[in-house]
Amino acid sequence: MQLIGMLDSPYVRRVAAAMLTAGVRFEHKPISLFRHIDAFSRVSPLLKAPSLIAEDGAALVESGVILEYLATRFPAVAALRPQGLPAFRALGAALVVMEKAVQIHYERALRGPGERSESWRERVMGQLGVGLAALEAAAPDGWFEGSPGHADFAVACAFGFVQGTIGDAAPTHAYKRLAAYAARAEALPALRAAPAIDGVTVEAMR
């Protein structure tokens, strides 16, 4: 199997972390949706990162779909699913934070000042703030489920993306518990092996 996409995407990174943690063998290809669009379209015509090239050569898209497919194939991936309501809530909030942070990042990177909608930006920033506040309130002292799973990886990847791309617009210093929690997660072997760096290839876990 091949995982297509750049690790600076929180969606690509959460899938990589899950596969690494579960011991699923895969090849990572850091192909950019912007710089390598022709190459990306040849392997995944829907132009969606992450894309997982399955055993039959077909491309699966959307991180949640990919993880559910992998759960049907690998019990160790299935074991990473949320087991309790707090973990489900954290996972949902983390996915909202990812989505809104990506929208803000693209708005700033791809549209000129005259093309931007201030009312839309305010709405998205409001959703982002609510999501971060929910994660701050939920941030536990340990892992949500006793050992790291999808919720933990999603929270860490979402918070890291906010810090790395739109930290000036959404200051993260106000979220001390969340920051401490994300820092602990970032120290996990799977996230160290899949750093949120443009163009980096997933490494073997050490």
Image (cartoon, rainbow, N blue to C red):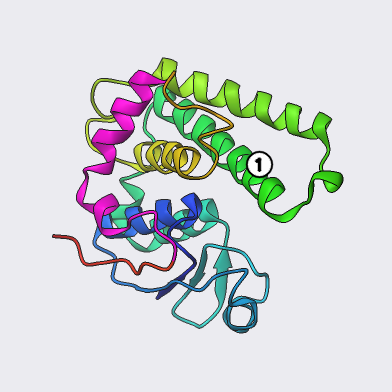
Identify whether 94 is placed above or below 26: above
Left or right of 140 in this view: 189: left
Left or right of 201 in this view: 58: right
* Total numbered labels: 1
Instruction: Check disc 1 and report its element: helix, strand or loop.
Output: helix
Q: In which quarter of the image is residue 121?
A: top right
Identify whether 147 is placed above or below 111: above
| Residue 167 percent coordinates (x, y) | 50, 35
Furthest-front residue in view?
113
| Residue 7 percent coordinates (x, y) | 43, 59
Q: In which quarter of the image is residue 182?
A: top left
Left or right of 95 in this view: 8: left
Residue for point 58% across, 35% down: 96
Q: Which amino acid does label 1 sit on?
A: Ile
| Residue 172 percent coordinates (x, y) | 45, 27
Identify whether 157 is placed above or below 128: below
Whether residue 96 can be seen here: yes
| Residue 20 percent coordinates (x, y) | 28, 59
Give, as a single range, the part of the protein colored magenta: 175-198
Whether residue 144 can be seen here: no
Residue for point 47% across, 44% down: 161
Furthest-top residue in view?
137
Residue 135: say if magenta.
no
Q: How crowded is mark 1: few (under 14 residues within 10 Å), some or many (20 or more)?
A: some
Residue for point 50% across, 38% down: 162
Quarter of the image with the C terminus in it: bottom left
Quarter of the image with the N terminus in it: bottom left
Give the main secondary structure of the magenta stretch: helix
Residue for point 55% across, 26% down: 131
Identify whether 40 is placed above or below 164: below
Tag 1 residue: 104
